[in-house]
């Protein structure tokens, strides 16, 4: 059991060492966005599959400078067989397959059509550049080309490229699914507040912060500060990979999470961090294999710890290798005293530097309004330092 308080760098290292990758699954490409490739994406067809017109214009056969214009129009999609002989041309739409015998495609603005002896004749504009607007078969890739390697994040662009390459399913780990649990007798989701109660202003928006970390929320639950209820909830069957539990991580009279985890035989991976806010954060492996991310109960502390650690959890569970961090130059930090790493809301200024957006109080998220990221300020950070940036959803 690991119970030593540590900084952010060491915390991420412990997450990488303490969590095992999820099993590999085959998913439809559209359902795999946010997951991580467990096998390369390799094209199965050339792209384009055949020669096609890159612009609206004319498919021509032969060098010209004039061609007899046939009365056909070639459009994209299924088409009948059509062949051009030397000196012939046909109207063609963008994306349409060029007819057999085509030597080049001329865009509309480079040609002129006129009637000569009762026939339509296509002529190249004498001032037009000599260029061919044909997309040749395999111009972008041939079958067997690797579009992305194992460990890459499946982004929207990768999913689209895979579909263009006739790849319908991919081998992946993830996307990570998380049950979100809000704890606290004082937290009320609906209805008027009684004295001593607090509105749940974090649970409804937490899925946005999870999505920013490539985690899908499966649902939101509320559990009161009773250890037996917490014990029962953690024992429920779930198809989620992760439990994100807010509250019950401190050392107060109503904070029972550590005791309950000990009772059920959970394996503590990380307990407490030298970061502010978010120092009471806890990560454990539950007996059924799910990972529990225990966040502080205060909204800003919970969000700060989440965006600082959740990407490392996703990386460890999915085997991701392409997860570069973001960095920026901070214009206004005073030297950070003490041993804790501070997480401070910042926004980018004209010229590219980053600046604090003002104080952020832990009981609410008003301090994040207008912020684009949290800056990671280790001890000793001063004005002009290059610091890590944790992106926030907009």
Image (cartoon, rainbow, N blue to C red):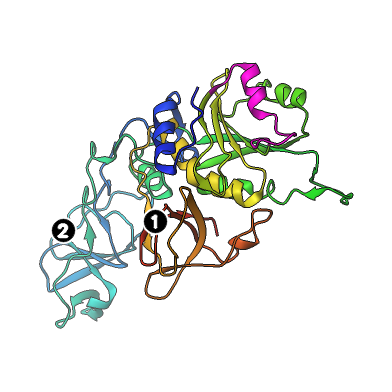
The quadrant in which the C terminus is found is bottom right
Residue occupying image coordinates x 54% and y 36%: 272
Residue 83 to residue 229: above or below:
below
Magenta segment includes 90: no
- In terms of depth relative to the viewer, which is nearer, 295 or 132? 295
Which label is found at residue 281?
none
Say which residue label 2 marks: 85
Q: Are marks 2 and 1 in contact (CB under 8 Å)?
A: no
Q: Residues within 10 Å of mark 1 (few under 14, many from 20)?
A: some
Seen in the picture, residue 79 relative to 238 is either above or below; the reply is below
x and y percentages locating residue 371 in the rendered image: 54, 63
Q: Is residue 370 left or right of residue 147?
A: right
- Above or below, 112 against 142 in this view is below
What stretch of residues is rendered in magenta? 248-267
Q: Which SS class for mark 2? A: loop
Q: How many other residues sit within 10 Å of disc 2, few (<14), some (14-19) or many (≥20)?
A: some
- The residue nearer to you, when weighing 13 against 128, is 13
Q: Position of residue 49 (x, y in %)?
A: 27, 46
Q: Residue at x 67, y 37 (%)?
A: 219
Would you say residue 23 is visible in this rendering?
yes
Q: Nearer the viewer, residue 368 or 120?
A: 368
Marks 2 and 1 sit apart, C-alpha to C-alpha, by 76 Å
Q: Residue placed at 64% from the left, 35% from the top?
A: 249
Q: Pinpoint residue 290: horizontal percent, then vertical percent.
A: 56, 25
Label 1 sits on residue:
380
Labels 2 and 1: the sequence-earlier one: 2
């Amino acid at each position: 059991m690991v119970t030593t308080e540590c900084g952010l760098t060491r915390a991420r290292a412990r997450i990488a060492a303490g969590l095992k990758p999820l099993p590999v699954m085959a998913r439809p490409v559209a359902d795999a966005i946010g997951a991580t490739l467990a096998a390369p994406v390799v094209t199965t067809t050339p792209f384009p599959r055949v020669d096609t017109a890159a612009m609206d214009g004319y498919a021509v056969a032969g060098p010209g400078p004039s061609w007899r214009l046939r009365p056909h129009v070639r459009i994209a999609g299924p088409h009948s067989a059509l062949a051009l002989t030397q000196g012939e041309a046909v109207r063609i739409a963008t994306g349409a397959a060029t007819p057999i015998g085509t030597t080049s495609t001329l865009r509309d603005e480079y040609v002129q059509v006129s009637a000569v002896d009762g026939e339509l004749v296509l002529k190249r504009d004498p001032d037009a550049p000599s260029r061919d607007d044909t997309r040749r078969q395999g111009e972008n890739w041939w079958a067997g080309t690797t579009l992305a390697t194992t460990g890459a994040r499946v982004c929207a662009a990768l999913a689209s490229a895979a579909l263009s390459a006739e790849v319908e399913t991919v081998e992946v780990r993830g996307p990570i699914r998380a049950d979100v649990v809000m704890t606290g007798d004082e937290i009320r989701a609906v209805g008027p507040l009684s004295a001593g109660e607090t509105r749940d202003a974090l649970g409804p928006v937490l899925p946005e912060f999870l999505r920013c970390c490539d985690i899908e929320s499966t649902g939101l639950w509320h559990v009161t500060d009773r250890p037996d209820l917490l014990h029962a909830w953690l024992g429920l069957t779930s198809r989620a990979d992760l439990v994100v539990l807010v509250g019950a991580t401190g050392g107060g009279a109503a904070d029972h999470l550590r005791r309950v985890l000990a009772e059920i035989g959970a394996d503590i991976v990380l307990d407490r961090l030298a970061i502010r806010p978010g120092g009471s954060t806890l990560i454990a492996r539950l007996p059924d294999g799910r990972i529990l991310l225990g966040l502080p109960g205060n909204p800003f502390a919970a969000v700060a710890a989440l965006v600082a650690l959740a990407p490392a959890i996703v990386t460890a569970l999915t085997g991701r290798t392409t997860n570069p961090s973001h960095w920026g130059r901070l214009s206004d930090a005073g030297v950070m005293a003490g041993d804790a790493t501070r997480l401070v809301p910042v926004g980018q200024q004209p010229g590219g530097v980053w600046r604090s957006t003002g104080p952020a109080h832990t009981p609410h998220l008003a301090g994040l309004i207008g912020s684009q990221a949290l800056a990671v300020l280790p001890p000793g950070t001063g004005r002009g330092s290059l610091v890590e940036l944790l992106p926030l959803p907009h």
